[in-house]
Image: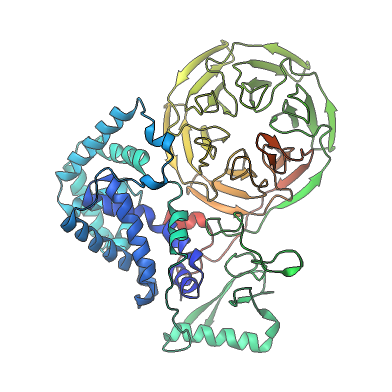
Amino acid sequence: MRTEDGYLIQQCLDGDSTAFGFIVDKYKKSVYASVFSRVNNFHDAQDITQEVFIKAYRNLRTLKIWDSFAGWLYRITANMCKDWSKSKSRRPDYEFVEDQESDLIDHVSMDSYQEYIVYKSVRDALESLPEIYREVLTLRYFGGMSIKEISSYLCASTSTIDRRLREALSQLKEEIPAMISTAYHQKGLPANFTFRIVETIKNIKINPISQMKGLPYGISLATGLLITILSINPSLISFNHIGMPVLSSLPAESKVLKVGEIPVDVIKTSNMPFLSNQQGKGKGGEPKKPDMQNAFFMAPQAEGGTWAKKGDMPTAMWGSSTSVINGKIYAIGGGDNNSFISTVEEYDPATDKWTRKADMPTGRAVLSTAVVNGKIYAIGGAQEIFGALPIVEEYDPAADKWTEKADMPTARSYLAAGAVNGKIYAIGGWNGNPYTSIVEEYDPATDKWTRKADMPTARGHLSASVLNGKIYVFGGRLNSAVTCPTMEEYDPATDTWTKKADMPTPKFWLSSSAVNGKIYAIGGVHEMWQGNGLSTVEEYNPVTDTWTKKPDMPTGRFALTSSVVNGKIYAFGGTEGWAGVNLLGKLLSTVEEYTPEGWSVVSSKGKLPSTWGQLKAR
């Protein structure tokens, strides 16, 4: 029975190089950690990791047993590290310089010395260990792999890996594993690593392998079964614009059939971008190139959940913020076609009706709001595109009244905010320098602000959601040219940050909401001053640290806002795209309601991968 690696390799050999992106994303942490354990230099480790995947793709046709890909990749990694050790030809300061933004290269952080100390401590600690111990320790704490995953990758038993790990830890100071993880967060692979690999291999031709000659018995049987099915109903098969056969109109559910002693997967394909016969179809059915929403780095389309159109907002607006009190949603501030506004409109999901409320004292957009004890706090924002305000104003829905509060210490716009245990945390944003990592805590009970631990990644146009006492921050802009997929978790109880799995799609000016233990990242845009708003919806599961693609929002947009009432997400307003530099396109009053639902697929163990997040977690 073919595993997920086998399926993806088949796609690559059939001419779909973008399928290799899933393989890269699945194994890049493991390879990077393994390389670093050997070369002990982050800069060279990035370079070698890139070369490992390119070499693996070039030689993919030589792999005899597809489902042994992990061990094969490990051997390529080990051999390339040996070659590096012999040559020592790469400069120690090389770190993808050709792709770095000049302002990033020139930037000298006050944290640089601390990062150096962490790096030196980790390097010295690892150098003190034999290689077999250094490798498992690095894979565990630098690559974030489980003992079972390390076992599979190194082709050793779990008991052997467990023993090596325990012996390695016994030889180190207690704080070293945490420092290894910290070093990885500081020196991890670039956010666009997978994208760059796939762009590189587009021009590399690998010879396809015939699937009708010398196939293993299990695969031959599956092929025979498929041919039998198609002979009964030829309408199930069609061809896409590059001549690849694809299946259509298959049953809605996946099943595992058993023919004799060999199980055969009959795969659900209706929404898989590799197989759907809708891939690459434009208006009228003509071929079109895949766009950023269906490219390789997106999670496979998931079923479950529905979208419904609701009553429009009275005012079309962008950059507003919404909060919920007593089952009502309050849309506050934003920008209309002419100005930055102070409008407050209350939406009742039960009746699908809108009611105008008392205006906010200070008209502004790109602010953030949070709720504590039945009051809404409107924080920061701007009255011009590149402005920043420290203003905080409190709204009491019961009295329909606004009250001025203590200014935020750091004026900013395009920020995120979340409330935990009666305190509000203002995170990141624009303050003219250009984006900040500052986190400030507001206590409504005392009307005072306190500085907290900085967010690891300085950014603005980001989004945040609160779940189980933690604040999850993701997406945004690093500077005027770089969009990031980064997800970071903040724990107010310990004032600490933890790196989490990246979003499948880098984007900014998105919105997010938390429902039933999951976070939904909605809409957004890829590039500043160009491109249309996205309809993409991606679900994050904090328990498994994985992302899953969910049904698209009907209206693609960015600069929107969203809130949750009774387990349903309501997306409000925004703009459909750019109309030029510093200009937004058509503003929207659109309201759409999303009802999340669970969905099941065949297990990823030994079968087709079900979500991008499952691949990232392995």
Q: Position of residue 35 (x, y in %)?
A: 27, 53
Q: Is residue 449 above or below residue 292?
A: above
Q: Nearer the viewer, residue 463 or 546?
A: 463
What residue appears at the point 45 percent right and 34 percent down from the top-left corner? Answer: 457
Residue 295 position in % (x across, y down): 57, 58
Residue in front for this viewpoint, 191 or 443: 191
Q: Quadrant of residue 528?
A: top right
Q: Decide which of 248, 294 is in the foreground and name it.
A: 294
Q: Quadrant of residue 108?
A: top left
Measured along the vertical axis of the image, is residue 47 above or below residue 267? above
Question: Residue shown at 66%/34% (left/top)?
Answer: 582
One can see residue 50 in this view = yes
485 sits left or right of 53 in the view:
right
Q: Position of residue 389 (x, y in %)?
A: 61, 18
Is residue 421 something one can see in this rendering? no
Residue at the spot 69% in from the left edge and 22% down from the top edge: 364
- Image vertical order of residue 213 relative to residue 521, above or below: below
Q: Identify the coloring.
A: rainbow
Residue 338, quarter of picture: top right
Between 600 and 497, the one nearer to me in the picture: 497
For the C terminus, the image quarter is bottom left
> Left or right of 554: which side holds 599?
left
Q: Position of residue 253 (x, y in %)?
A: 64, 69
Vertical position of residue 253 compared to residue 426: above or below: below
**What number of labels is visible?**
0
| Residue at 66% over, 64% down | 288
In the rendered structure, the answer to whether residue 352 lies left or right of residue 280 reads right
